[in-house]
């Protein structure tokens, strides 16, 4: 589980870095911010159930948000971003600004990192 979690968190870091690059399209940056937060939420998935398919899934956002004690507002924002990510090619309006999506991803990552630090056993 640790290697999988580490890969997802490293991926989250990379997506977040990319989302912060100015000059790229807002759709791309918002998508990358969502993927950053989503990958962080996926990293705690082994703590509540087995693998799921067909991403992005609202259950990842819901269960992950519950596990990391995310605020209702951030859980709802994550669900709106997930729906936008899933349907953005149908020209759905953006649920928030790019900066708000990036801030959400950072809050999610920080909360996941706190949870992972509290559940990781200390080395002998």
Image (spheres, rainbow, N blue to C red):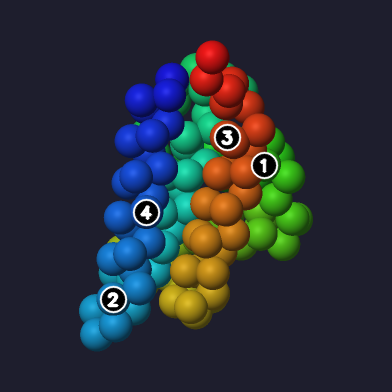
Q: How many marks?
A: 4
Residue 113 screen position, x and y as percent? 55, 44
The residue under the point 39% across, 69% down is 30
C-alpha separation, residue under disc 1 versus residue under disc 2:
27 Å
- Please rate how many residues cluster around mark 3, counting C-alpha atoms within 10 Å: few if below 14, some from 14 to 19, many from 20: some
Residue 28 screen position, x and y as percent? 29, 69
The residue under the point 70% across, 50% down is 70
Instruction: Indicate left or right for 95 with 72 as reference.
Output: left
Residue 62 screen position, x and y as percent? 63, 42
| Mark in front: 3 vs 1 | 3
Label 2 sits on residue: 21
Circles 4, 2 touching at the beta carbon (< 8 Å): no
Label 3 sits on residue: 116
Along the viewing direction, whichever of 32 and 5 lies nearer the viewer: 5
Label 1 sits on residue: 68
C-alpha separation, residue under disc 3 versus residue under disc 1:
9 Å
Along the viewing direction, whichever of 27 and 20 lies nearer the viewer: 20
Circles 4, 3 touching at the beta carbon (< 8 Å): no
Label 4 sits on residue: 13
Instruction: Indicate left or right for 78 with 19 as reference.
Output: right
């Amino acid at each position: 589980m640790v290697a999988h979690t580490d890969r997802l968190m490293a991926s989250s870091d990379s997506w977040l870095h990319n989302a912060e690059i100015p000059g790229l399209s807002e759709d791309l940056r918002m998508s990358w911010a969502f993927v950053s937060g989503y990958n962080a939420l996926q990293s705690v998935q082994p703590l509540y159930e087995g693998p799921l398919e067909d991403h992005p899934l609202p259950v990842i956002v819901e269960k992950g948000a519950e596990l990391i004690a995310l605020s209702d507002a951030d859980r709802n924002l994550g669900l709106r971003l997930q729906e936008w990510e899933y349907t953005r090619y149908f020209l759905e309006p953006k649920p928030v600004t790019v900066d708000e999506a990036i801030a959400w991803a950072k809050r999610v990552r920080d909360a996941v990192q706190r949870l992972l630090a509290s559940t990781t056993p200390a080395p002998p």
